[in-house]
Amino acid sequence: MARLNTLCTLLFIAITTVIHAQPGTLDPTFGTAGYVVTNQVGDGRSIAVYPDGRSVVISASGGASAMGMFQADGSPSTGFGTNGWFTGLGYVPIKVLLQVDGKILVAGAWNSGGIVDMIVARYNGTGTPDASFGVSGIARVDLPTTETCLGMLLLADGRILMTGSIIDPDQRALLAMFNTNGTLDASFGEGGLVKWLPTPTSSSTEAQDAAIQNDGSIVVACNHGAIIANNLLVRFTASGDLDETFNGIGHVYVDLGNNQDDILNVQLDASQRIICMASNSDAGSAHSGSLARLTTNGVLDPTFGVGGVVALNTASTTYSAAAMLRSSDGKILITGTTGGTFSPDRELFVARYSSDGVLDPVFGTAGYAFVVLPYREVGQSIVPTSDGRIMVCGRSQESGQSGYVMLARFWYDSGVGIATHAASEINAFPVPAQNTLTLDRGHPLPGGTLIEVRDAAGRIAPVTFQLNGARAVLDMAHLPAGLYSVTLVASDERSIARFVKE
């Protein structure tokens, strides 16, 4: 048994009772009163956060592109590019993720002689291209056709799943699986690619986002322009075959009513139910937006919202959703903007819903948190931090001026009533972690104890655990080697840990 101290691989960080912020308020220790408006022109499209609080954000505006790094206090990371930015990436960035070794993955689209290719670039932690990945740090789907890139997912084994579309000759949903070295994974689909259209065949199908079930099956959110009810969920096996056990045909249309919303995000809850977020798709459904929850077999869950669907607006609101996050306690967070594209008053917002789709009244003001500035603000990406806060990136724009990349950090919980648990009172073994990790709190753990593990990219790493008196034993055998954090909440005590898995 190893007693934890500041020299151990596993470090428990005490959360003290001196924090008295309301959930949903801006974190004043970040930037200026909780937000940073940078001098980088463009949209903050995606953000990822290291366990130490540093953040990486990607930006695009017209033909310009950039990648920036910020310290935990919101100041630019001066050792990263020029004043914290690398500009002129040579492609349009779409999403950024962090590997467990700290390397940076950026998905995007690369215009190569008039043909657009889906690409993923890998950078070292300093922002320099990783020459061991792909060709000079870039891997791409190199076909004589145009592909779009809409999303990226990092699997537990380090492989990279890309989502988008391909013109072949119809517009088909496209999945691309890359190995850790940037080569296409020949064991997935056909040569690493899956191209899919619903039956009967028709055009204009895009794969927006994906989520991985515990058995390796891939749930893909698609938009399909042939009909009004244009949202599809498709399930593929881990090898890329259509899984016809899903709704009997491998896919299901998701009816969001008259909203005509487009599903942008899909995630899974602890029971493997499917959670979708959709945003308005056209002027006929402007400022609608929806959340939906479906069973593992693709049936709308009547215990969520109304018939499985939650409208994100009322008759008096015009909020436009852009991104979703499911938190470790099952709650759902949404970010976006409070007004339409041409609205003179738009504010970045974050909304929090219960796991059953009800606005959380203790978060912000009646479930909403805002960044209120005399400009137009938009939230476009939302991620958790390892210490339980929320990071959002987006854009701040004065009327008639260019927009600038913006970041904001919010409190998720208040910290009030959460007692300090001293590091010297906690034992853990083995250190480093191997197939199992045992946490010993020194006093009995109640049946409602919550434990969550996240990798260095901030993604939830599914683990099972058993409680035995004062101990919790976590099954770590399936997790790849790397740096992780674990949060343990028991009664009114909370601890956050970082550990290495061998």
Image (cartoon, grey):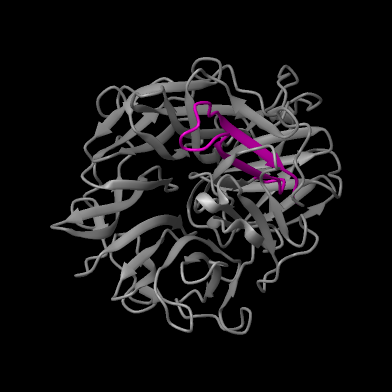
How far across and how far down the image is residue 255, in percent? Answer: 64, 66
Tell me, yes or no, if residue 81 can be seen here. yes
Tell me, yes or no, if residue 188 can be seen here. no
Residue drawn 62% across and 37% down?
A: 497
Name the one closer to the observer, 195 or 374. Answer: 374
Total marks drawn?
Answer: 0
Name the one closer to the observer, 281 or 357. Answer: 281
Q: Which residue lies most toward the left here?
A: 113
**Above or below: residue 415 compared with residue 95:** above
**Above or below: residue 277 compared with residue 273:** above
**Image: magenta residue range:** 327-355
Residue drawn 35% across and 57% down?
A: 149
Q: Which residue lies most toward the front here?
A: 284
- Magenta stretch: includes residue 272: no
How far across and how far down the image is residue 89, in percent? Answer: 23, 41
**Above or below: residue 286 compared with residue 221:** above
- Magenta stretch: includes residue 339: yes
